[in-house]
Amino acid sequence: MPFEIICSKCGTVLYLGFDLKSPRDVLKATNNKCKGCGANLNYLDFKVEVTEI
Ligand SMILES: [Zn+2]
């Protein structure tokens, strides 16, 4: 099952993959910014979803 981390402000998928990652680690890779809307994000702002196929 793919795992998604989505910006809560614009809905951009910041991470999609099969490895479970913490939003904190994903944010570290993007300097705490959403690559879609450029907002500074806190990891608490993230929606973490597991998508069923
Ligand atoms: Zn965004």
Image (cartoon, rainbow, N blue to C red):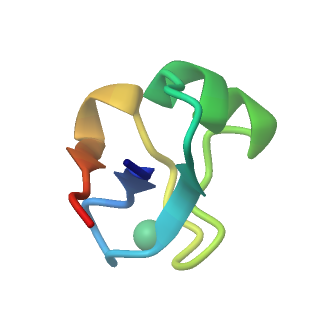
In this image, 36 relative to 6: left or right? right
How many tags in the picture?
Answer: 0
Residue 8 versus residue 23 in the image, above or below: below
Q: Residue at x 62, y 35 (%)?
A: 26
Judged from this view, the residue extending furthest toward the front is: 53
Q: Residue 43: which quarter of the image? A: top left
Q: Position of residue 40 (x, y in %)?
A: 51, 50
Q: Residue at x 55, y 42 (%)?
A: 18
From the image, which quarter does the C terminus lie in?
A: bottom left
Q: Residue at x 48, y 68 (%)?
A: 13
Closer to the camera, 24 or 33? 24
Residue 28 versus residue 5 in the image, above or below: above
Q: Position of residue 48 (x, y in %)?
A: 27, 42
Closer to the camera, 13 or 43? 13
In this image, 49 relative to 17: left or right? left
Q: Position of residue 1 (x, y in %)?
A: 37, 48
Q: Quadrant of ligand 1?
A: bottom left
Closer to the camera, 42 or 13? 13
Residue 42 versus residue 1 in the image, above or below: above
Q: Position of residue 39 (x, y in %)?
A: 49, 62
Q: Residue at x 57, y 78 (%)?
A: 36
